[in-house]
Image (spheres, rainbow, N blue to C red):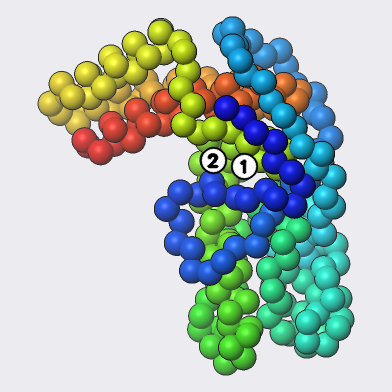
């Protein structure tokens, strides 16, 4: 079942198991201009109604410290300490550590365009840069207030990285930014898919060596890539029914992959 996510009420719980050291501020949805794409084919979709929220919340940009290039570089809010125009990480005037800006989405944190396909190296590189800037050794001389801000920022960066680094969680996050909540526990009434999952589980259970398990992993990866591409095509042309169905199918294959990896 799907429900409407109202503006200002969207909560991000996509990075399962992330080490949340402090309370996260909510990330409001942002409007996206439609993109051109190729033709998308999907099996028949039953009862895939979607309610899209009116999500016109504006987003202040991240400073060049957040990587630029992907929407960053705009001025942040006023510095809490000196009143100067601040930045996501620190004030350019007094160097005070700033609180997390709730209007900044995960893509802007890493200076990336808000789109499904991202370069893993760019994401990993920016993540490492942020970790260096937020390292406890660099803020230990700051006030307790600023150390708390740095801890919140570090936790947010970790959550953002884990969300964007995985195709399924990245897809779900993009849908949430559009005001679309996906019921992650919803099952698909597709006998062929369910039979395939049973066969995969049996194959994993019967596998007696790592070589066989690696072959199973490769087969599952191919299916994940197919539905990952289907999501991108559907999302780019704002076919949200198709995009949601793609995430549901990706979840089945991702779970099958987890079971396979556990046995390796």
Residue lying farthest left?
Answer: 208
Is residue 191 rendered to the left or right of residue 186?
left
The relative height of residue 74 versus residue 47 in the rendered view (above or below) is: below
Q: Classify mark 1: residues with Cα within 10 Å, few (<14), some (14-19) or many (20+).
A: many
Q: Which mark is residue 1?
A: none
Q: Which mark is residue 169?
A: 2
Q: Classify mark 2: residues with Cα within 10 Å, few (<14), some (14-19) or many (20+).
A: some
Is residue 223 rendered to the left or right of residue 2?
left
Residue 54 at what x, y percent from top left? Answer: 82, 39
Residue 225 at what x, y percent from top left? Answer: 51, 25
Q: Secondary structure at mark 1?
A: helix
The relative height of residue 57 versus residue 91 in the rendered view (above or below) is: above
The relative height of residue 64 versus residue 247 in the rendered view (above or below) is: below
**Quadrant including the C terminus:** top left
Is residue 155 rendered to the left or right of residue 212?
right
Q: Secondary structure at mark 2?
A: helix
Residue closer to the observer: 103 or 209: 103
Q: CA distance from mark 2 to mark 1?
A: 6 Å
**Quadrant including the N terminus:** top right
Is residue 144 rendered to the left or right of residue 236?
left
Q: Tell me how many marks there are.
A: 2
Residue 137 at what x, y percent from top left? Answer: 51, 84
Q: Which residue is pictured at 54% across the width and 32% down the height?
A: 183
Q: Is residue 195 visible?
A: yes
The relative height of residue 65 versus residue 45 in the rendered view (above or below) is: below
Q: Is residue 234 visible?
A: no
- Quadrant hosting residue 227: top right
Q: Which residue is pictured at 85% across the width and 45% down the height?
A: 56
Q: Which residue is mark 1?
A: 173
Q: Which residue is pictured at 34% across the width and 11% down the height?
A: 195
Marks 2 and 1 in Cβ contact (< 8 Å): yes
């Amino acid at each position: 079942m799907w429900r409407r996510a109202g503006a200002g009420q969207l909560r991000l719980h996509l990075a399962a198991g992330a080490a949340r050291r402090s309370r996260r501020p909510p990330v409001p949805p942002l409007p996206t201009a439609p993109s051109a794409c190729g033709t998308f084919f999907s099996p028949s979709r039953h009862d895939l109604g979607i309610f899209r929220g009116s999500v016109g919340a504006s987003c202040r940009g991240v400073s060049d410290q957040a990587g630029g290039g992907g929407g960053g570089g705009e001025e942040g809010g006023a510095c809490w300490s000196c009143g100067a125009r601040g930045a996501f990480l620190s004030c350019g005037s007094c160097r005070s550590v700033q609180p997390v800006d709730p209007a900044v989405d995960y893509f802007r944190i890493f200076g990336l365009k808000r789109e499904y396909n991202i370069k893993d190296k760019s994401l990993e590189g920016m993540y490492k840069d942020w970790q260096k800037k937020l390292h406890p050794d660099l803020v230990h001389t700051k006030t307790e207030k600023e150390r708390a801000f740095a801890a919140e920022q570090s936790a947010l960066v970790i959550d953002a990285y884990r969300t964007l680094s995985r195709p399924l969680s990245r897809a779900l996050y993009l849908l949430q930014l559009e005001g679309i909540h996906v019921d992650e526990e919803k099952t698909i009434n597709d006998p062929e898919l369910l039979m395939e999952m049973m066969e995969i589980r049996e194959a994993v259970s019967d596998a007696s060596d790592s070589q066989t398990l690696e072959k199973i992993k490769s087969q599952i990866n191919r299916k994940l890539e197919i539905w990952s591409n289907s999501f991108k095509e559907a999302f780019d042309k704002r076919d949200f029914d198709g995009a949601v169905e793609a995430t549901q199918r990706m979840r089945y294959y991702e779970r099958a992959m987890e079971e396979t990896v556990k046995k390796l």
